[in-house]
């Protein structure tokens, strides 16, 4: 009941944010929603299936360019967002059949190479992408982008929760721990990996289009920035890989820390953010969520028990004061004889 009430309050506050938040706060929320969505998408293939990689920014950038080109052809931005998501998923289907044959660092480096190839194509295809100049979009209302990014985030959060409590999620975790054993148990590992890879690329395509709508333009450096990929991975690692709330907690924590340090110490904020991430990973290698579940909250039931006993003592009626017991005077004994 309490968790449901808290969730309702959070959703109500998020839904009414445009009514009381300023332009700076709205911009911060839009960027945070987009990065949280990217973190959840990466968590599907990297956290649950165990295929960590540095190429999700490729689907993000492809979605941004497809959306920008579609909007430039006078297609409504919502339809352009859907087209960007579908195009990213189709590219993932083609790449997944090839790239998922690789494992470990080979898959990670291979996907990083795919992202760099996409950036080179965006620079080289001047007739379509305008090269390094980039594409400019028709302005989209910031509130509309905010609600669209929030809707994508809610869908990803619900899908992750459903996956975590399903047989499919258990199969993905089995693949992460031992793919050979998973195949021996009857799990169709190849098909499941490709489907998960496609799902992890669908939403980044949509978020890339929304990011282009938010900025009002897109260029290769912005669309395929390696820093975007590293930030998303850091968010998932900080929150906890393969968990429902890990990407959300990690993204919120890193976004707030990054924004505060950038405002207070702009010269060295990147070094400070890196140091904070390093310390957090060293002391909480499985993320904030796992640390909180296993160690940080052990005192909650103990504190509840103490508070309950204290309340019972205060509510109990006061006992009457006992009268002092005075020993009677001893009578002198008569000596014999």
Image (cartoon, rainbow, N blue to C red):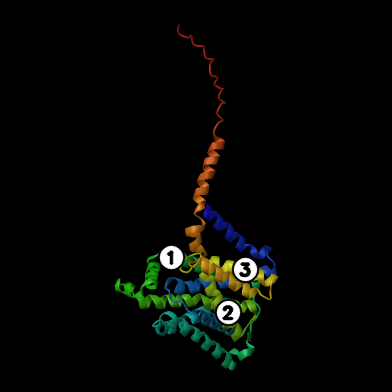
Residue plotted at (54% across, 74% down): 232
* Nearest to N terminus: mark 1 or mark 3: 1
Q: Is residue 62 above or below residue 300?
A: below
* Nearest to N terminus: mark 2 or mark 1: 1
Q: Quadrant of residue 67?
A: bottom right
Q: Is residue 320 above or below residue 294?
A: above
Give the CA separation, mark 1 to mark 3.
28 Å
Residue indicated by mark 1: 164
* Numbered disc total: 3
Q: Is residue 234 above or below residue 102?
A: above
Residue indicated by mark 2: 227
Give the CA separation, mark 2 to mark 1.
29 Å
Nearer mark to the viewer, of 1 and 3: 3
Q: The C terminus is located in which quarter?
A: top left
Which type of secondary structure does the marked residue at label 3 adopt? helix
- Whether tag 1 and tag 3 are in contact, CB under 8 A, the answer is no
Residue indicated by mark 3: 257
Crowdedness of circle 1 by 10 Å Cα count: few (<14), some, many (20+)? some
Judge whether residue 306 can be spotted in this image. Answer: yes
Q: Quadrant of residue 33?
A: bottom right
Residue closest to the far top = 337
Percent position of residue 84, x then y? 53, 80
Could you tell whether 162 is left or right of 249 in the image? Answer: left
- Whether tag 3 and tag 2 are in contact, CB under 8 A, the answer is no
Q: Quadrant of residue 222?
A: bottom right
Judge whether residue 155 can be spotted in this image. Answer: no
């Amino acid at each position: 009941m309490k968790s449901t009430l808290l969730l309702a309050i959070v959703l109500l506050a998020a839904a009414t944010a445009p009514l009381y938040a300023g332009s700076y706060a709205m911009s911060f929320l839009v960027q945070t929603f987009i990065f949280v969505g990217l973190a959840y998408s990466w968590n599907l293939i990297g956290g649950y299936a165990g295929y960590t990689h540095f190429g999700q920014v490729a689907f993000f950038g492809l979605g941004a360019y497809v959306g920008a080109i579609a909007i430039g052809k006078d297609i409504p931005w919502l339809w352009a967002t859907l087209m960007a998501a579908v195009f990213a998923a189709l590219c993932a289907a083609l790449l997944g059949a090839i790239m998922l044959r690789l494992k470990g660092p080979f898959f990670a480096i291979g996907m990083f190479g795919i992202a760099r190839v996409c950036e080179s194509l965006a620079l080289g295809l001047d007739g379509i992408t305008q090269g390094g100049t980039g594409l400019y979009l028709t302005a989209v209302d910031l509130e509309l982008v905010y609600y669209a990014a929030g809707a994508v985030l809610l869908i990803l959060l619900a899908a992750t929760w459903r996956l975590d409590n399903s047989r499919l999620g258990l199969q993905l975790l089995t693949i992460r721990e031992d793919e050979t054993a998973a195949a021996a148990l009857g799990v169709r590992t190849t098909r499941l990996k490709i489907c998960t890879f496609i799902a992890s690329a669908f939403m980044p395509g949509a978020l890339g289009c929304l990011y282009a709508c938010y900025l009002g333009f897109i260029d290769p450096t912005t669309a395929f920035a390696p820093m975007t990929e590293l930030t998303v991975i850091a968010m998932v690692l900080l929150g906890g890989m393969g968990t429902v709330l890990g990407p959300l907690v990690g993204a919120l924590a890193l976004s707030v820390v990054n924004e505060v340090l950038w405002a207070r110490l702009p010269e060295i904020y990147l070094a400070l953010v890196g140091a904070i991430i390093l310390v957090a990973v060293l002391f909480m290698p499985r993320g904030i969520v796992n640390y909180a579940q296993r160690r940080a909250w052990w005192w909650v039931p103990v504190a509840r028990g103490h508070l309950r006993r204290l309340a019972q003592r205060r509510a109990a009626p006061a006992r009457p004061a006992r009268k002092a017991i005075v020993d009677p005077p001893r009578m002198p004994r008569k000596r014999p004889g």
